[in-house]
Amino acid sequence: MEPIQWEIKKFNQLTAEELYELLRLRVDVFVVEQACPYPELDGKDTHAQTLHVSVRMSGGNLAGYLRVIAPGVSYPGVSFGRVVTAKSFRGRGLSHDLIEKAVELARVNWPGIPIQIGAQEYLIAFYRSHGFEAASEIYDEDGIPHIDMVRKHG
């Protein structure tokens, strides 16, 4: 696998070009590809403690992204979301790398605090493989079945 480069930035550290690139990837996948019109810009990107995590391949191509959200913003615990891999980079295990990086950042920045996420239902087994357990019944969010999941020990 070609080398990857991690970038972890707060909102005010992102250049206009980086922000555009991240938002374009999120909209391309979550709104267009998944045919799900929803409020992509929810105000959590600009929170002072939100960490924007990008993974780039050699050549600087954006391959994946997620954001790590401080406790009390989305859930009582730490959270992460908008986990996305660009179509041309899927099948290489980058989503697993992204989750491992999110867990590491949560552990370092908010030690001992559980990680809570709202996962799409079809990804339950994926998140279980990373130590997450179901914490709710399945519910509808923007027309897509979701479930809350928790990882108690970061």
Image (cartoon, helix red, strand yellow):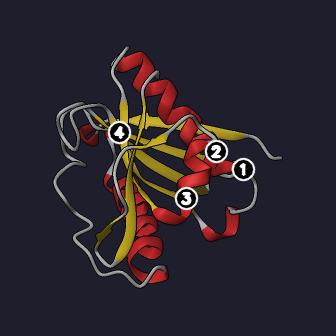
What residue is disc 2 on?
96
Q: CA distance from mark 4 to mark 3?
A: 14 Å
Tell me which amino acid carries mark 1. Gly
Q: CA distance from mark 2 to mark 3?
A: 12 Å
In this rendering, the answer to whether 151 lies above or below 107 is below
Q: CA distance from mark 1 to mark 4?
A: 22 Å
Q: Are circles 1 and 4 on residues that touch, CB within 8 Å? A: no
> Which tag is nearer the camera, tag 1 or tag 3?
3
Tell me: 118 left or right of 102. Answer: left
As drawn, which residue projects farthest toward the right? Answer: 1
What residue is disc 3 on?
123
Tell me which amino acid carries mark 3. Leu
What residue is disc 4 on?
116
In this rendering, the answer to whether 23 lies above or below 56 is below
Element assignment for label 1: loop
- Lower position in the chain sequence, tag 1 or tag 3: 1
Where residue 31 appears, x then y in whole percent? 38, 77
Residue at image coords 58%, 34%:
100
Q: Are circles 2 and 1 on residues that touch, CB within 8 Å? A: yes
Residue at image coords 30%, 71%:
140
Residue 52 position by quadrant = top left
- Lower position in the chain sequence, tag 2 or tag 3: 2
> Which tag is nearer the camera, tag 1 or tag 4?
4
Element assignment for label 4: strand
Instruction: Bin the neighbour count of mark 2 within 10 Å (Cα to Cα): few under 14, some 14-19, many 20 and up.
Output: some
Circle count: 4
